[in-house]
Amino acid sequence: MIANDPIEHLITLLSRLPGLGRRSARRAVLKMLMDPNDKMLPLADALRAAADSVRPCEVCGNLDAASPCHICSDRHRDHKHVCVVEGVADLWALERAHAHRGTYHVLGGLLSALGGTGPEDLSVTPLLRRIEADGIEEVILALPATVDGATTTHYLTDRLKPTGCTITRLAQGVPIGGALDVLDDGTLTAAFKARRTL
């Protein structure tokens, strides 16, 4: 291949995106090149506009063209309940499921000794300031059920207890539609520990 081939360059750039290998990127590029005015140029314009205008929200860390973001500035949301998530992808997943009608706080990662992520790398101080300034009543820890997620949950619980707000975490266990014989031991154990009276 020619080193400055624009088609190969585009395929290489697209193949770096999550979920797109070289074959998928090649198919996408071919589709766009077959109709560049309808598929490629509008995409290029949208990419440029997003790169120029989308920034992290100054309040919660969500990505939006406005700051505060549309969630933080929504008067119909419950601003006394904040859901803490690892990253923006988790926030978007909860929004897609309509699972939370309060606001959010993006930590920007998890504590990880192996990954070299310490407390100073996470957005904990802004969360503590929000709790005090906004009178937050409940902080919901929606962190992954991993070792790093559990470590971060314990750390945040210790930091948040002195604020006096209620601290909760998402339930863990058997997913809806999940068969017991295909679940791992950790999930089954968590499900038994989180059982409740009917």
Image: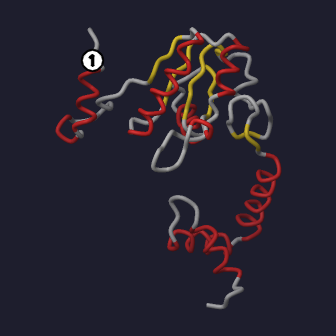
Residue 122 location, x and y as percent? Answer: 61, 37
Give left or right: position of 153 versus 179.
right
Residue 166 location, x and y as percent? Answer: 52, 11
Give left or right: position of 77 versus 27.
right
- Identify the residue at image location x=28%, y=13%: 196
Nearer to us in this view, 129 or 187: 129
The image quadrant that residue 165 belongs to is top right
- Identify the residue at image location x=80%, y=57%: 48
Dot 1: few (<14), some (14–19), or many (≥20) neighbours within 10 Å?
A: few
**Quadrant position of the C terminus in the picture:** top left
Give left or right: position of 180 versus 13.
left
**Quadrant position of the N terminus in the picture:** bottom right
Residue 31 location, x and y as percent? Answer: 62, 71
Nearer to us in this view, 138 or 182: 138
* In this view, 141 is above or below 12: above
- Identify the residue at image location x=74%, y=35%: 57
Q: Amino acid at mark 1?
A: Arg
Nearer to us in this view, 31 or 94: 94
The residue indicated by pointer 1 is 195
Disc 1, SS:
loop
